[in-house]
Image (cartoon, coloured by chain):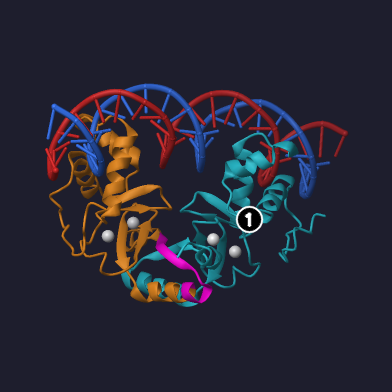
Chain colours: A orange, B cyan, C blue, D red
Amino acid sequence: MAHDHSGHDHVWADDLTRNQELVLGTLAHAEAPMSAYDILDKLRDEGLRAPLQVYRALDKLTERGLAHRLESLNAFVCCADAQCHKAGTIAFAICETCGRVEEFAEPTVEQKLSGWSRAAGFVPARMTIELRGTCRGCVSSLPA
Amino acid sequence: MAHDHSGHDHVWADDLTRNQELVLGTLAHAEAPMSAYDILDKLRDEGLRAPLQVYRALDKLTERGLAHRLESLNAFVCCADAQCHKAGTIAFAICETCGRVEEFAEPTVEQKLSGWSRAAGFVPARMTIELRGTCRGCVSSLPA
DNA sequence: GGTGATATGTTATCTTATTACATCGCACCG
DNA sequence: CGGTGCGATGTAATAAGATAACATATCACC
Ligand SMILES: [Zn+2]
Ligand SMILES: [Zn+2]
Ligand SMILES: [Zn+2]
Ligand SMILES: [Zn+2]
């Protein structure tokens, strides 16, 4: 609406509000996804008191692609790649052992899903792709 | 009676418990995904009183592939395809207008995601693929 | 100064999911 | 038969996630 993002003007965008900056900063320092309430707890000292303050910031951040929501965790991560919009739909690999998340793009996957949609007459607005499993580091440190 | 649910040619496991059968039957008759609490409300008359009774049944049903959880909705659907296990990972197209869900398989998608995983050293346990958008029927009846 | 749009703060409430504990039913075995 | 183990059930209480409703503040613009 008010914003016109024809380009890629937001890297560490400098037009964030205070709450948005606090929330994004918290996510940026996190090793693993955080729920809205996790974030709220971290920001009590900064004056945040209510869930809505966090949810509102998260809404704006995810709209702009600066953060992502992981549907299968009800949690949020900082976007790991300022360019992720150009790469098309994003996928996430979530380690169930250490909690770390890797963000990646697989253009072929998006193509295939778009292809199915076209054939089915379905008009996709957004795609959620999340893998749950065990990351390289955790696999190698697991019992044989 | 126990094996006849609204024309679904599902292979109804005959070893379901009473609660599991009630929950699966409710999902089988639904036009759209239902939350656990939606299901509970439908089953009050049958004697179900607590969320846990529904969640426990849903756990078993999803384990066996008779129902699926839609992560992006926190809701559940009856499996639409008795063969979906053989088809590999399943994807869902969710209409945000009418609520209906289509379940489909795209083997290439799974291959690509598995390929990425192999390269990244990630061992996937399960994959979530959900498209949100507008179905054929709703697109054609939308204002131009 | 007045007006509208956006951001904030605060409380209460709603929805979704789990923990904890008691009980029941039934297969299995001595 | 009685005991034992295990899975399913019933119930209450609570945790975790998300939103509704309403009041206030801030700033650009005229
Ligand atoms: Zn990203
Ligand atoms: Zn890991
Ligand atoms: Zn299925
Ligand atoms: Zn529709």
Q: Where is residue B12 shown, x and y percent of the image?
A: 73, 60
In-front residue for pair A64/D30: D30
Query: In the rendered structure, which segment of residues is drawn in magenta?
Result: A117-132
Q: Which residue is mark 1?
A: B31
Q: Residue at x 35, y 61 (%)?
A: A92
Ligand 4 shows up in the quarter that is: bottom right
Q: Where is residue B26 shown, x and y percent of the image?
A: 68, 50
Looking at the rendering, which quadrant does residue B42 occupy? top right
Q: Residue at x 43, y 65 (%)?
A: A124
Residue A92 counted in the magenta span:
no
Q: Where is residue D22 shown, x and y percent of the image?
A: 36, 26
Up/down of D1 relative to B59, above or below: above
| Mark 1 residue CB less than 8 A from any atom of ligand 4 | no
Dominant SS type (magenta): strand
In-front residue for pair A25/A8: A8
Quick check: A23 left or right of B139? left
Up/down of B46 relative to A110, above or below: above
Q: Residue at x 40, y 54 (%)?
A: A96
Badge 1 marks a residue whose secondary structure is: loop
Dot 1, crowdedness within 10 Å: few (<14), some or many (≥20)? Answer: few
Answer whether residue B47 is visible to the viewer in this image.
no
Answer whether residue A58 is visible to the viewer in this image.
yes
In-front residue for pair A59/D20: D20
Residue A126 counted in the magenta span:
yes
Q: Quadrant of the C terminus of chain A?
A: bottom left
Image mark count: 1
Q: Where is residue A69 shown, x and y percent of the image?
A: 35, 52
Looking at the rendering, which quadrant does residue D1 occupy? top right
Q: Chain of mark 1?
A: B
Q: Amino acid at mark 1?
A: Glu
